[in-house]
Image (cartoon, rainbow, N blue to C red):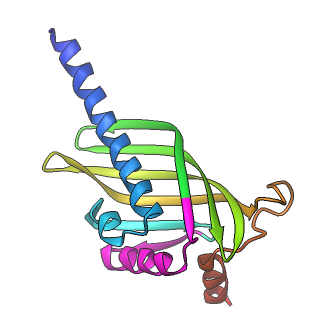
C-alpha cells in the first residue's frame, strides 16, 4: 500500500477505536459499573453535565459524580449513540455524538435525548477521555412525550445543581 493508503487506514483504525471507547462507556454506564466507566478516563479529566453546566475538575470529582449517579440512576437504562463525528489531531481527538435513552426512573418509564462532546488523548496506544460534556436535551415520561417542558422528570443532578446556586 502507498503512504496515502497507510495514512487513511491508520485514521480509520483510530476512529474505530474511539467509537469503541464511546460504546464501552455506554455499556458501563448502563450496567452501573463505576470501575469500568473510570477506566475510560485519563488521570487528568473533567466532566461537564448540562444543564446546568457545572464543571467537575479532576479525576476525583469526576468519579464522585459518577458514583452518585450510579446510586440514583434509573433501575433500567439503555442508551444508544448515533451520528458520531470524530476529528483526529495527532495524539488528541474530539468526538461528538447524539444519544437516545430509555429507562425506568423511580417506577416511571422515561425517554431521554442529548449529546456527548468528548476530548480524548491517546495514552500508550489507548484513547481516554480528558473532558466529557453530557448535554441533556430532554428527560420526560414516555407516556407524555418530549413536546413542551423539556425536564418533566428531573434528574438528581438537576435538583442538586439548582440548590447549589441558591
Q: Quadrant of residue 153?
A: bottom right
Residue 3 included in the magenta stretch of the image = no
Magenta stretch, residue numbers: 53-77
- Tell me: residue 8, above or below residue 158: above
Q: Where residue 47 appears, x then y in whole percent?
A: 44, 67
Name the quadrant of the N terminus.
top left
Q: Where residue 39 appears, x then y in whole percent?
A: 27, 63
Name the quadrant of the C terminus.
bottom right
- Tell me: residue 14, above or below residue 60: above
Residue lying at 84% horizontally and 54% vertically, measured from the top left: 147
Q: Quadrant of residue 101?
A: bottom right
Residue lying at 22% horizontally and 13% vertically, measured from the top left: 5
Q: Is residue 39 left or right of residue 119?
A: left
Q: Out of 17 and 87, give the one closest to the viewer.
A: 17
Q: Where residue 133 appears, x then y in whole percent?
A: 49, 59
- Tell me: residue 110, above or below residue 101: below
Q: Where residue 70 appears, x then y in whole percent?
A: 46, 75
Q: Which residue appears farthest toward the top when viewing the image?
A: 2
Q: Is residue 119 left or right of residue 42?
A: right
Q: Is residue 50 left or right of residue 55?
A: right
Residue lying at 16% horizontally and 13% vertically, measured from the top left: 3
Residue lying at 39% horizontally and 36% vertically, measured from the top left: 87
Amino acid at each position: 500500500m502507498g503512504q496515502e493508503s497507510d495514512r487513511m487506514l491508520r485514521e480509520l483504525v483510530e476512529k474505530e477505536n474511539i467509537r469503541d471507547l464511546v460504546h464501552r462507556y455506554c455499556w458501563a454506564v448502563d450496567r452501573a459499573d463505576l470501575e469500568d466507566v473510570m477506566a475510560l478516563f485519563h488521570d487528568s479529566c473533567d466532566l461537564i453535565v448540562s444543564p446546568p453546566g457545572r464543571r467537575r475538575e479532576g479525576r476525583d470529582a469526576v468519579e464522585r459524580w459518577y458514583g452518585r449517579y450510579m446510586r440514583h440512576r434509573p433501575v433500567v437504562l439503555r442508551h444508544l449513540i448515533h451520528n458520531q463525528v470524530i476529528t483526529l489531531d495527532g495524539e488528541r481527538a474530539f468526538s461528538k455524538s447524539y444519544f437516545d435513552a430509555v429507562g425506568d426512573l423511580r417506577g416511571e418509564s422515561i425517554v431521554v435525548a442529548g449529546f456527548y462532546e468528548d476530548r480524548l488523548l491517546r495514552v500508550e496506544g489507548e484513547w481516554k477521555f480528558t473532558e466529557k460534556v453530557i448535554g441533556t436535551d430532554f428527560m420526560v415520561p414516555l407516556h407524555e412525550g418530549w413536546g413542551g417542558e423539556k425536564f418533566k422528570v428531573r434528574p438528581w443532578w438537576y435538583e442538586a445543581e439548582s440548590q447549589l446556586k441558591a
